[in-house]
Image: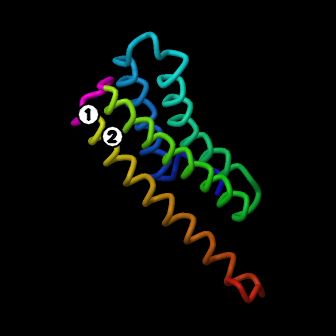
Amino acid sequence: MSNFRELAVWEKAHVLAVQIYKISQKIPQTELYGLTSQMRRACVSIPANIAEGCGRGSDVDFARFLYIAMGSACELEYHLLLACELKFLEKEAADAVIAGLSEIKKMLSGLIKKLKNVNCKLSADPLC
């Protein structure tokens, strides 16, 4: 896989990153180097790791970057929950973003599983 733009999961993650940048503008300026920065870093990490993994030479490397993207998605979900709890974001807005994030996480899981299945079929590893 070399063209990350062809992946639906990358497209959804990219749209999510743009959405997070927009909603994070509502967070108080005092959080610019705190929660806002962390949310933006985590949201950008998702499509960036999908893209980087696509550029790697093997399915094993690609899967490793998808796991990193999954970790960033989980981190972002927590940041959204915290921002909502602190009343920086409205619950409805956070819930809508988390729903989209859940879909991305499912897509990442499916792609990881697919890559693992392909590699197990090619491998003599009895643990596959």
**Residue ranking furthest to the top:** 29
84 left or right of 52 in image: left
Q: Residue 88 appears at what percent x and percent y?
A: 33, 23
Residue at (61%, 77%) from the top-left corner?
A: 117
Magenta segment's dominant SS is loop
Q: Is residue 50 magenta?
A: no
Q: Residue furthest left?
A: 92
Question: Quadrant of the rendered structure where residue 58 is?
Answer: bottom right
Specify the segment rendered in magenta: 87-92
Mark 2 crowdedness (10 Å alpha carbons): few <14, some 14-19, many ≥20: some
Q: Which mark is residue 105?
A: none
The residue shown at (41%, 38%) is 16
Q: Position of residue 111 (x, y in %)?
A: 53, 64
Circles 2, 1 touching at the beta carbon (< 8 Å): yes
Q: Amino acid at mark 2?
A: Val
Tell me which residue sits at (49%, 15%) in the image: 32
Q: Position of residue 29 (x, y in %)?
A: 43, 10
Find numbered disc 1 in the image and state the secondary structure of the residue it sits on.
Answer: helix
Where is residue 68 shown, x and y percent of the image?
62, 50
Characterize the local packing of mark 1: few (<14), some (14-19) or many (20 or more) Cα atoms within 10 angstroms: few
Per the image, label 2 sits on a secondary structure element best described as helix
Which residue sits at x=55%, y=71%?
113
Quarter holding the C terminus is bottom right
Q: Which residue is mark 2?
A: 97
Asked if residue 88 lies in the magenta stretch, the reply is yes
Q: Residue furthest front?
A: 86
Q: Is residue 128 above or below residue 62?
A: below
Query: Quadrant where the N terminus lies?
Result: bottom right
Q: Is residue 21 above or below residue 63?
A: above
Image-quadrant location for residue 57: bottom right
The residue indicated by pointer 1 is 93
Q: From the viewer's perspective, is 55 left or right of 41?
A: right
